[in-house]
Image (tube, helix red, strand yellow):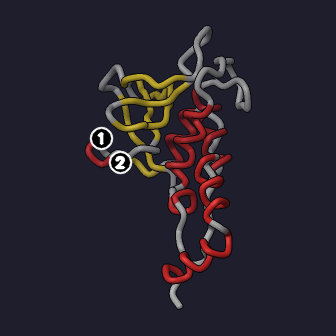
């Protein structure tokens, strides 16, 4: 019997009411051999979701979470929670990523802002030319449009 064929019998054993209750509260039914949305998500996608969950958290220079962040602290925290370690600063993170072109960027990639050859800021690409980031003192973690062309992209591997 394949995993797909086991779903109806598992549902029958769990009961329709139980399945509806799980669906109503955002739960899921795990079936061996089937990938769930959560397990199919990549580390980068998980990191992006974690960063988004920190929306509104205050910026604090040098902070790495879980309640306050600076830019590289947010990326470090998000990837660590998703299962991947990154170095502490934006420049160090840039040096540890696989550099990619803007045309190859995907949600969950890191976006590095630079002046000349110096990286000064980092965020997590959210798609549609937007990033999740911790901008500066007095601000909060937020989704924002990329405001310059002076960016490089890096993929965490």
Q: Examine the image and state in which quarter residue 147 appears.
A: top left
Dot 1: within a 10 Å radius of its alpha carbon, few (fewer than 14), some, or many (20 or more) residues? some
Q: Nearer the viewer, residue 20 or 36?
A: 20
Q: Which residue lies under the disc numbered 1? A: 102
Name the residue rendered at 61%, 11% in the picture.
Answer: 137
Marks counted in the figure total: 2
Note whether 33 is above or below 121 in the view shown. Answer: below
Disc 1 is placed on an element classified as helix
Note whether 134 is above or below 79 in the view shown. Answer: above
Left or right, 11 with respect to 148, comes to right
- Image coordinates for residue 24, horizontal then vertical, percent: 60, 47
Q: Nearer the viewer, residue 81 or 156?
A: 81
- Image coordinates for residue 114, horizontal then vertical, percent: 42, 26
Name the residue rendered at 64%, 42% in the picture.
Answer: 87
- Image coordinates for residue 98, horizontal then vertical, percent: 44, 51
Q: Report if residue 157 is visible in the image.
A: yes
Residue extending furthest toward the bottom = 1
């Amino acid at each position: 019997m394949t995993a797909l064929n086991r779903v109806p019998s598992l549902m029958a054993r769990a009961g329709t009411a139980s399945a509806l209750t799980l669906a109503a509260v955002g739960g899921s039914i795990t079936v061996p051999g089937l990938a769930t949305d959560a397990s199919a998500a990549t580390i980068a996608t998980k990191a992006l979701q974690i960063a988004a969950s920190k929306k509104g958290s205050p910026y604090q220079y040098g902070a790495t979470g879980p309640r306050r962040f600076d830019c590289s602290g947010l990326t470090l925290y998000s990837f660590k929670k998703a299962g991947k370690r990154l170095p502490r600063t934006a420049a160090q993170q840039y040096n540890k990523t696989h550099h990619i072109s803007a045309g190859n960027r995907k949600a969950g990639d890191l976006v590095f802002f630079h002046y000349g050859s110096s990286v000064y800021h980092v965020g997590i690409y959210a798609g549609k030319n937007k990033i999740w980031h911790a901008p500066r003192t007095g601000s909060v973690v937020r989704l924002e449009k990329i405001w310059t062309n002076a960016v490089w992209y890096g993929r965490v591997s």
